Amino acid sequence: MRYPDLSFEPFFTWANRPRILYKAGVREELGFEMEKLGGTRVLLYTDKGLVQAGVAQMVIEAIKASSLELVGVYDKIVQDARLDLINEGAAFYRKCGADCMVVVGGGSVMDTAKAINIMIGGGHEDFSPLAEQVGLFDGAQPLPPHIAFPTTAGTGAEVTYAMVVLNDIAKAKVAVGHPFCTPDIAMLDPELTVKLPPKITAFTAMDGLTHAIEAITTVNANPISDALGLHAIRIITKYLPEVMKNPGNVEARGYLLIASTMAGMSFINAFLGGAHATAHALGALYGIPHGLANSIMLPHVMTFNLEEKPERFVLIAVQAVKNLQKSVGLTQTLKDFDVPDDREALQPLIDLAMGDSQLPYNPRDLEEDDVYNLYLKAR
Amino acid sequence: MKYWKDETEPVKAFVTLWETLSKEDEFIEGMKKVNQLIWFDYTEDGPNCSFHVDGRDGKFIVKAGKPAEAPDLTMSLTADNAHLSWANKLNPVMAITRGQIKVKGSATGLLKLAPKLKKVALYYEQILKDLGWADKLAK
């Protein structure tokens, strides 16, 4: 792939957290690494699906084989990081007398755990006022030891210093940032992703692809995010079809996991754009899984943005994204989710997307009418 | 301060900017959605260096100084960074992560106005020119 001369903003910053360990079976290093962080009494955060699939047990066995003490397992986390479960999860940490956390799960589990660790580190009882504040950078302190095992390959939540929190009452998703909320160590163990159902594998990989594409086309794209984002795109487009054909291919699963982490590092520093802004709103109001909402919106936002940064879009063809969607059997329309087409009914969705934190980073200005048209085109 | 002679200058520029915005339908509608009392606090550059916007219950009142009531949201930054911010030359998320902007209270409402920053910058540029301060335009 020829790399053209790409301009970038004269000033940018780059945050590098956490440390990353990769290996099929890397969970066997958990005890050694947690001891170095000072953790002894572990609380494991996960969800019921991962418990039932035996994935949480794989990490529990690694804990039991170490000198760490497992003081509890909190498996109530559901789709999206919900305020009530964040508060409950923090109360459980205190009740169990834990001094560190191990997190096994996808984006919702990892984001919930990040918020819980902020509450534990700061001595908070309720996360709601913190979520409202959006940025928790002023006076932020390092948090208790925290190691995460992503079990999906797409969210990149193991390397992002923000969490997306769902306010179920306000029906809105808010991105909340904290400089130390990322785990101290992200352990990428592809063996934990082998049992991921094909549908979720595809949704989450498309989320990762959207991260990479938006990160290299956002107004904040820079040479470091370009490098990570572009290679993540290459890996996902190569290995997602392979994993869909052979779900047990640990090597291919590993590549997807690495690509997800690379895309996460890319977007948390360069930010995102219109696909995520419109997808967040679809998730909040219509319950469409985040990766699938991104997948549906991505080609339409790319087409909309094409005129603004053509030199960047020559690197990533819209048609290639559509072909990938088809090859892995994903829907390409919002009609499947009863998203309406009249303006009045769509207005709450448009309002949410217009207030999304990622919208200002879209390379082309998005007005309300533009967002409306994007939703129409995605139907 | 790099851009301002004293603390009265930024307050004059920013209050004029927001008074202008308060007459524009697009921003009136935007502030209805925000529905907050917001204090823009630049007091690290002088005790009187601040202004507030009361957008509660359909109001859109702009005044210099700290509000008499407790604000729903306080945005604290330097007057120079505020200048860059209104000129759309300061990435707000980057500024928050670097501690250049300190947020106290609920910022979710104000985020709804973030996509309008480019338009705000156009108004701001014109206001600086009208005030005879074109030399302050951020480079």
Image (cartoon, coloured by chain):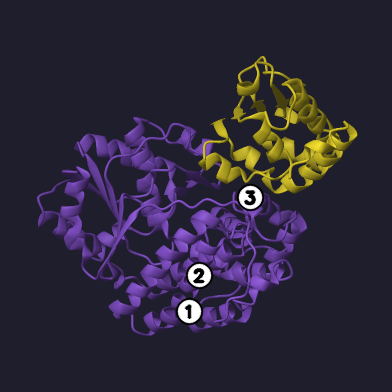
Chain colours: A purple, B yellow
- Indicate which disc, 1 or 2, sits on the residue closer to the N terminus: 2
* Disc ID at residue A71: none
> Which of the image's four quarters has the N terminus of chain A?
bottom right
Q: Answer yes or no: are tags 2 and 3 on the same subunit.
A: yes
- Along the line of sight, the residue nearer the viewer: A42 or A75: A42
Pointer 1 and pointer 2: residues touching (CB < 8 Å)? yes
| Pair 1/3: label in front | 1
At which x and y percent is residue A40? 16, 43
Amino acid identity at mark 2: Leu
Residue to which mark 3 is pinned: A352
At which x and y percent is residue A256? 39, 72
Residue A234 visible in rendering: yes
Q: Secondary structure at mark 2?
A: helix
* Disc ID at residue A237: 1
- Indicate which disc, 2 or 3, sits on the residue closer to the N terminus: 2
Tag 2: Cα neighbours inside 10 Å, few (<14), some, or many (≥20)? many
Q: Secondary structure at mark 3?
A: helix
